[in-house]
Image (spheres, grey):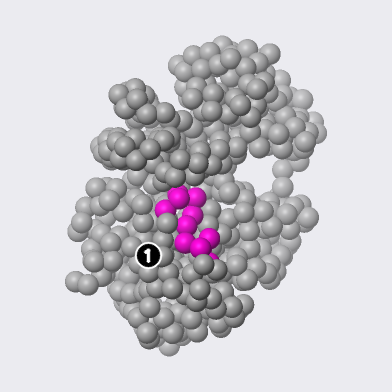
Amino acid sequence: MVIKKNKDEFLSYLEDTSNLKGDASLLFIPENEKEVSDVLLQAAEEEIPLTISAAGTGTTGARVPLEGAVLSLENLNRIKELDKKKSTIVAEAGVTLERIEEEANKQGLTLRSQPTEPLAFIGGVVSTCASGPRSFKYGSIRNYVKRIKMAMTNGDIWEIERGSIFARKRKFKFSINGREYKFNLPTYHMPSVKSSAGYFVDDDMDLIDLFIGQEGTLSCILEVELLLHKRPYNLFDGIVFFDAEEKALEFVERIKQLRLHSFQYPCVVEFFDFNSLEFLRPFYSFIPSAQCAIYFEQEIDSEQQADLMLDYWYEFIEKSGASIDKCWFAETEAERQKLYQFRHHLPQAVNEYLRKYSQTKEATDIAVPDDKFHSMYYFYKEVALRSRINYVNFGHIGQNHLHFNFLPQNREESFLAKGYIMEFIEKAIALGGTISAEHGIGKIKKPYLEIMYGRKHLEEMAELKKILDPACILGLDNIFDRKLLKK
């Protein structure tokens, strides 16, 4: 095991893509699960706050320590098994999504849920219940987690398989490794949209779901078994440029209706507003003149279906009022890579912009119900106009889930942006939405979660943590304030 005590040697572990800066006095880089367990036990006995570190691709500061020690999972990086017959893969927590997909593809398989950042560690992905563009059709990583192995702060190693332990309403009672556990779940009800805001709770829920989205506060994930599926015969990608926002929104509503027909059902539906296109224009000078754009990805099951699918989409696009001549289409792997890079360049460029001006991310991860999306969308525009701060608005419009990013250039604009973000949060909650659809809460969004659920329910989360992490050392200040653990 590598142990570093000189902070100058591990400064990169004290931040993530949110640009939040942290502090720690110690870094552990274990080589195997026993060493992970030993670190957790030592930290618990010595009451050392311990922050679990994945790849650093998160946006909410969850892996950023405020004190104590960091436990990096980078050397738990083996793919232990890939079973083609069962369509499963077992990967240690430090394996990247990119590598999982590469190995799966070799066997003609794929991980349908592909969260946005390919270099993210699977442990971090599961810990935040990440999703991404394909969640329009396939949902979050939660839907593909079959088993989790975890280290607990009492020295135990837990293995939980989906379907093995269930709650009775909101009460769990079970035995693992000779220890009995009995506890009540928090009583809040999660919104009826994709959400990664706080602990997942529901009546009669599966125990495994409690640890998906826990953000390193209850356990340290060691390995994950995932369900894979047959890789599609081919993909057809396109970006449709619109000269009016209303046409784009109508186009998306018509796409949502396609979900009723399995033949034409895209797995990705993404949005770029005018500012997003202008922000990308220096990198892609050939972007046509447009007010906004919709990116879609359609799976194709067979060679026979390919031409028919293209015809369907061409006709569908022409009826939307967009110009086919302005559209970008990708049928080959090389063409798809270009569109993929275009889609993913925007959040990367935003992060680089914020680093240039030494500003932290001021952005939303909001999702609202279908019938409330237009209200939320036009509220974004109203507040943005009032703010006079530069911004981009883009993301998973198929799930009513956009990432509105302010682009402050100084501390004054950043301070004002925080206030406007709070307006967005209050609006989303009033509309029955969530304040975090895919990126979790971390340290940055704690105040928003209290607005969403109320202090009583945060206290219930803290009580749950005390049972599963009785030393109260893991992921302090993630999801809720550590002060709640002292009551």
Q: Quadrant of the N terminus?
A: bottom right
Please tell me whether residue 223 is drawn above or below residue 311 in the rendered image.
Answer: below
Is residue 104 rendered to the left or right of residue 346?
Answer: right
Residue 11 among those drawn in magenta: yes
Q: Is 278 or 242 nearer to us in this picture?
A: 278
Is 148 situated left or right of 204 in this image? right
Q: In the image shown, does 486 or 145 lie closer to the viewer?
A: 486
Residue 315 location in percent, x, y? 65, 16
Residue 324 position (above or below residue 109): above
**Most prominent secondary structure in the magenta stretch?**
loop
* Residue found farthest to the bottom: 178
Please name whichever residue, 241 or 9, is drawn nearer the observer in this view of the structure. Answer: 9
Q: Is residue 122 visible?
A: yes
Q: Position of residue 92 (x, y in %)?
A: 61, 69
Q: Is residue 82 above or below residue 229?
A: below
Q: Which quadrant is home to the C terminus?
A: bottom left
Residue denoted by label 1 = 66
Circle 1 SS class:
loop
Residue toward you, 296 or 346: 346
- Residue type at mark 1? Leu
Is 32 above or below relative to 122? below
Where are the magenta residues, as a range? 10-20
Q: Is residue 217 visible?
A: no
Please name the residue shown 50% across and 35% down the image.
Answer: 395
Q: How many marks?
A: 1
Q: Residue at x 69, y 57 (%)?
A: 99
